[in-house]
Image (tube, grey):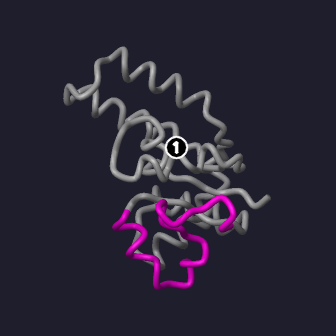
Amino acid sequence: MTPLVVDASVAVKWLLPEVHSPAARRILTADEDLLAPDLLWAEVGNVLWKRCRSGELTREQAQELLQDFRRLPVTTVSARSLVAEAWEIAVQFDRSVYDSLYLALAVIRECRLVTADRAFYSSLRRTPLAASLCWVEDIRPESH
């Protein structure tokens, strides 16, 4: 089975009801090997903090969601091991190193990154990296 890399735009949709949440949750129920750079922890934590700060979530709700997230089957990979490849992607395609870490992992592991970040996806879908990228609504368990 080929693993899938998931970014924070997908992982947050596992926890919070948002556009594309049902598609993101299908990934969890498909018995896939899921990977992400360890940056994922900080990004998901930051989204929950922002939602708490804005009053959308209570502190307790955000903490419970963070605990729920810790139980999800995502294997994280050290950003340190990915940063050189991520840097090259960022410079070549004018993307942030943060976002490029996820794509670097997909390139290195020869699999695909699933994202719900429309701007990121659109900016790369006509590049040589398109084969390593998948829009969240297009992923099907048997499609990778």
Q: Which residue is mark 1?
A: 40
Q: Which structural element holds mark 1?
A: helix
Q: Residue at point 50% right, 63% down?
A: 100
What residue is shown at x 53% (from left), y 68% (from top)?
A: 134
Question: Residue 139, relative to residue 70: is it above or below?
Answer: below
Q: Main secondary structure of the magenta part?
A: helix
Which residue is depicted at the point 56% across and 49% down? 26
- In the image, residue 93 lies at what x, y percent? 45, 77
- In the rendered image, residue 94, in percent from the top left (x then y), is placed at 40, 74
Which quadrant would residue 114 be assigned to in this image? bottom right
Question: For this view, does 103 lie left or right of residue 49?
Answer: right
First to last magenta residue range: 118-144
Q: Residues within 10 Å of mark 1 (few under 14, many from 20)?
A: many
- In magenta stretch: residue 122: yes
Q: Check the image and report above or below for 32 versus 83.
A: above
Identity of the amino acid at label 1? Leu
Q: Quadrant of the C terminus?
A: bottom right
Q: Nearer the viewer, residue 127 or 26?
A: 26
